[in-house]
Image: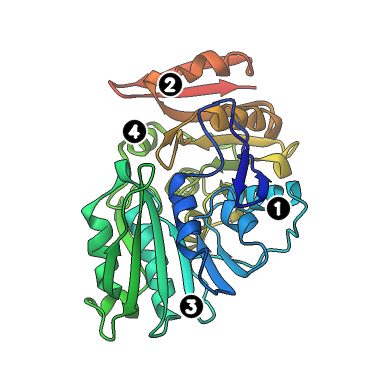
């Protein structure tokens, strides 16, 4: 796995977090390097960074005044670990996509897979922009979408593409519009509304499955049973909180703890469970909840991470679940059948049963 990156005369050691055994993966992309090259000769002191997933921009630009907009708890940890690994200060100015920014002169964005999240970033920048604001957006050519241009044109007069370099390209955005194409984009929060059993659920742009509840979660909810004695419940990879919400519908005495790596998912679930007995934790693992003796853990665990498919993180979470459950506690999850999670779960739990399945998904019940 490539870990050393040389920029001019400096060498940086950069590792991914969570760690992976996939030697084809590295902690930076050519799109991020192209963005660094683009600004290398510019006299810039104050830069806002978006989607700096593993901290390459934070490390290379450490001598600048940086503000990092974070979306994942694992991202925060990856950035700090790589700064420390290179003997650099890990005193990072972090903000979320919902925070107001100071005056934005230059912003770097690695365009995320979610186009909604890309727009949320641009709206946040626009609200703190001025006539000279410049936004440099990097992407790999194989992931290009004309929607990049359409979204950028809502907020900026000039949207220019760079030449390609090592299968990467930049969009350079200039001249924030005096009157954006859609005034609603600035007067209302970028939130989607979903219907679930007569209730309206809210979720911020970028949270998984924006138009409706995804089919895996729907199948899970159709088959979800909560026993009266299961009052201490953990929802792992909780998303907008719909599974936790249904748990409280099925057992009014249940207190749910929702955990998700994505801060906008946690903020969305806070809206949807504001009148329920619920706790919220933005974290990439369950280490802080070990030995909490949960009666029940429910989950629709992810295996997509941006454009990558990787079950290593999920398998690690299964070990965390075992450490969080009480003896004889239940772990109930839904998964794509091709992932073969049952084989891995059999190594951790006393009983593992597929309680229902269809052509695409299976619901697995594990007993500690």
Residue 298, given in percent of the width and then of the height, sits at: 52, 36
Instruction: Give left or right: position of 249 versus 200.
Output: right
Label 2, label 4: how far apart the Cα atoms are: 17 Å
- Judging by the rendered image, the residue that carries numbered circle 2 is 339
Q: Which residue is mark 4?
A: 219
**Tag 3–tag 2 contact (CB < 8 Å):** no
Q: Image height check: is 79 above or below 306? A: below
Q: Callout 2: few (<14), some (14-19), or many (20+) C-alpha neighbours within 10 Å?
A: few
Extreme residue in the right direction? 87
The quadrant of the picture occupied by the C terminus is top right
Q: Earlier in the sequence, mark 3 or mark 2?
A: 3
**Would residue 334 be seen by someone viewing this image from the given angle?**
yes
Q: Identify the element where label 2 is drawn.
A: helix
Label whose residue precedes the other's in the sequence (4 or 1):
1
Mark 1: secondary structure: helix
Q: Decide: few, some or many residues near mark 1? Use Cα within 10 Å; few <14, some 14-19, many ≥20.
A: many
Label 4, label 1: how many angstroms apart (C-alpha)?
42 Å
First in sequence: mark 3 or mark 1? 1
Residue annotated with mark 3? 105
Where residue 126 appears, as percent x and y from the top left, is: 39, 77
Of tags 2 and 4, the one toward the viewer is 2
Among the two numbered marks 2 and 1 on one chain, the one whose residue lies closer to the N terminus: 1
Q: Position of residue 21 (x, y in %)?
A: 59, 25
Image depth: mark 2 or mark 1 in front: 1
């Amino acid at each position: 796995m490539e870990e050393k990156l040389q920029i001019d005369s400096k060498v940086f050691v950069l590792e991914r977090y969570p760690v992976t055994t996939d030697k084809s993966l590295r902690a930076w992309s050519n799109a991020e390097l192209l963005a660094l090259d683009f600004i290398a000769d510019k006299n810039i002191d104050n830069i806002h960074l978006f989607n700096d997933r593993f901290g390459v921009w934070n490390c290379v630009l450490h001598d600048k005044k940086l503000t990092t907009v974070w979306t994942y708890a694992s991202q925060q940890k990856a950035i700090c670990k790589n700064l420390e690994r290179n003997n650099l200060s890990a005193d990072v100015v972090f903000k979320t996509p919902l925070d107001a920014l100071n005056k934005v002169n230059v912003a770097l964005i690695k365009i995320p897979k979610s186009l909604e999240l890309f727009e949320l970033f641009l709206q946040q920048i626009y609200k703190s922009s001025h006539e000279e604001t410049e936004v440099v957006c990097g992407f790999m050519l194989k992931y290009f979408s004309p929607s990049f241009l359409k979204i950028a044109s809502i907020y900026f007069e000039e949207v220019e593409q760079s030449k390609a370099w090592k299968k990467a390209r930049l969009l350079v955005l200039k001249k924030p519009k005096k009157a954006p194409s859609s005034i609603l984009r600035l007067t209302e929060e970028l939130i989607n509304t979903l219907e679930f059993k007569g209730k309206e659920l809210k979720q911020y742009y970028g949270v998984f499955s924006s138009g409706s509840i995804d089919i895996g979660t729907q199948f899970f909810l159709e088959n979800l049973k909560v026993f009266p004695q299961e009052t201490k419940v953990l929802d792992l990879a909780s998303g907008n909180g719909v599974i936790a919400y249904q748990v409280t519908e099925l057992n009014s005495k249940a207190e749910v703890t929702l955990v998700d790596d994505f801060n906008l998912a946690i903020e969305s679930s806070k809206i949807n469970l504001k009148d329920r007995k619920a706790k919220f934790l933005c974290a990439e693992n369950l280490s802080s909840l070990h030995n909490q003796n949960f009666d029940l853990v429910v989950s629709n665990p992810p295996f997509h991470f941006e454009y990558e498919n990787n079950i290593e993180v999920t398998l690690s979470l299964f070990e965390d679940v075992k450490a969080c459950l009480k003896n004889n506690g239940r772990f109930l999850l839904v998964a794509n059948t091709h992932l073969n999670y049952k084989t891995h779960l059999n190594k951790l739990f006393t009983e593992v049963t597929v309680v229902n399945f269809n052509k695409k998904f299976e619901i697995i019940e594990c007993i500690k």
